[in-house]
Image (cartoon, grey):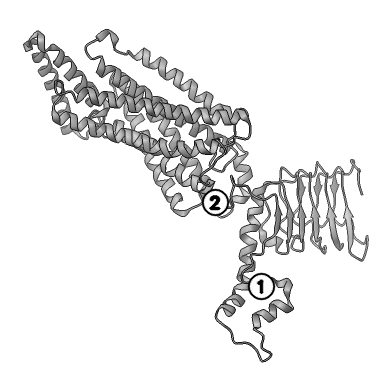
Amino acid sequence: MADNMRIDIIPANSFLGIAKDYIDMNLVRNGFKEIKSYAFNGTKLNTLILRDNRNLHHIQEDAFQGATGPSYLDVSSTALSSLPSKGLSQVRSLKATSAFALKSLPPLEGLAELLEAKLTYPSHCCAFHTWHRKQRENASRKFCDLSEAGMEPTDDGMNLVIDINFQYADLEFGCHSSPFVMCTPKPDAFNPCEDLLGFPFLRCLTWLITVFAVAGNLAVLVILLISHYKLTISRFLMCNLAFADLCMGLYLMLIAFMDFNSRHEYYNHATSWQTGPGCSTAGFLTVFASELSVYTLTVISIERWHTITNAMHINKRLRLHHVAAMMAAGWGFSVLVALLPLVGVSSYSKVSICLPMDIDTMASQIYVMAVLILNVVAFLVVGFCYIGIYLSVHNPEHSTRHGDTKIAKRMAVLIFTDFLCMAPISFFAISAALRMPLITVSHSKILLILFYPINSLCNPFLYTIFTRAFRKDVCRLLSHCGCCNANSDFYRSQTLASQHTCTNKVADKKPHSLSFYAYHVKMKGCFLSKGAT
């Protein structure tokens, strides 16, 4: 039966009594929208072809109840979003090509006899790769154990396991074979048959990093935004950095939640996740956060280098509106870079962790290479600025040995974390972008989870939480709630004493020592107290 566009359903008992023997039923290019329960009741189906019924979107659970078979089922080019979990136990060959709405498979226990599958999405073949192998290996393990134990031969000189394999070859009890369902299309190198976060230790690390990254950056944002102090350049930049790193923490949280929900069954979630809004959102968050964080770190480094090297030139200082304009440009750049994969330049759906790894077109390859090179350049700028700062404060005419050591250690930590984050990722990513990958996607997940979010994890602590100014803000806010009053009074008295001392020094110093005073106060007061001690 074909080309009957006016038939929109197949009701119960539609084929009852049509034949007593096994039949091949060909129902192609019809107007079917739904197949009701008991539709094939009383039939013996050898093959059932439902191909090209483009309006067919649902087969009820009991549609094959009362029927024998089918052994071959073809639902290609239909709108089915799922297959019934009952009635498919005798299917040996399943064809579902171009069935783009079919993003999940029924419970595999209902396809126990399946030997061949031609599907739409590669991830579905992973289901049979793992589950069916386990079923057959469990059945053959007994015989393999007996063989490996050195079972004594029977009276006719044959080993029992060899004899069983010889007489019942279709049971496939080969101890060194790996029987699989013949399934196409096969998974590619970008989407191996594994959970989203492949390794158990990686799953634990992801949750640990997520908690610290989200909690740390959220705390920084809350304290800086609700404090009643004037918005300075330092506070403004710290807020931008904390927001960027918070977005990275949210990306890791999305990945961790998806891994938790799809554990051991990612093959049934892979297509809907990677092609849906979840992966697009995660990809946008991580690229936006990464670029904004790198950009903000670069601006912070340039601002501090400019401030310290021009301490005597008041008219050369950067003002808040200058830095705000720079950050507006950074936001625009970060949003643009994160949006490009959503409009066809590379793609977030290439891999399960939603990074733009698609380099199939020239535009995509140029995009990926440009982003990586810009990040490397940004790291070099940050390193140059901090080295310049260190050389300035290391001058014995302008700082004490204790101050040099303290600042040098802090700079070393900052540059080391930036290098640890950027170097391995940039190296392997650039090699992959040049179509010369050095590691697999499974191993790249380890690299990306361990190194990619290092800055987002460390920045709130190195730049803000571990600084004296932040502790002062926390104590003052807690003092309004009746807590930390002693520490708040201590910090307040220190601030007043510092201001009084500075005023006296300005009056007492001779003109020739003014240069040292201005430089020393600017370097110590601005650099140490405002977030980079």
Residue type for callout 1: Phe
* Residue nearer the viewer, 184 or 435: 435
Total marks drawn?
Answer: 2
Count neighbours of disc 2 (C-alpha within 10 A) and say few if under 14, some if 14 to 19, many if 20 or more: many
Q: CA distance from mark 1 to mark 2?
A: 29 Å
Q: Secondary structure at mark 2?
A: loop
Residue at 18% across, 32% down: 405
Q: Which residue shows up at 75% across the image and 60% down it?
A: 88
Residue pointed to by mark 2: 195
Residue 263: where, in percent of width, then height?
A: 54, 53
263 versus 54 height, above or below? below
Q: Is residue 387 visible?
A: yes
Quarter holding the C terminus is top left
Please tell me in which quadrant of the rendered image residue 301 appears: top left
Disc nearer the start of the sequence (1/2): 1
Against 511, is 186 above or below?
A: below
- Give amino acid for label 2: Asp
Q: Which mark is residue 62?
A: none
Q: Report the side of 21 relative to 499 (left or right).
A: right
Q: Looking at the picture, how far across and down is residue 312, in whole percent? A: 21, 12
Label 1 packing within 10 angstroms: few (<14), some (14-19), many (20+) = many
Q: Is residue 90 left or right of residue 150?
A: right
* Residue 345 appears anywhere in the view: no
- Image quadrant where residue 401 sits: top left
Q: Name the mark on residue 173.
A: 1
Instruction: List x then y, in percent, for residue 388.
Output: 28, 23
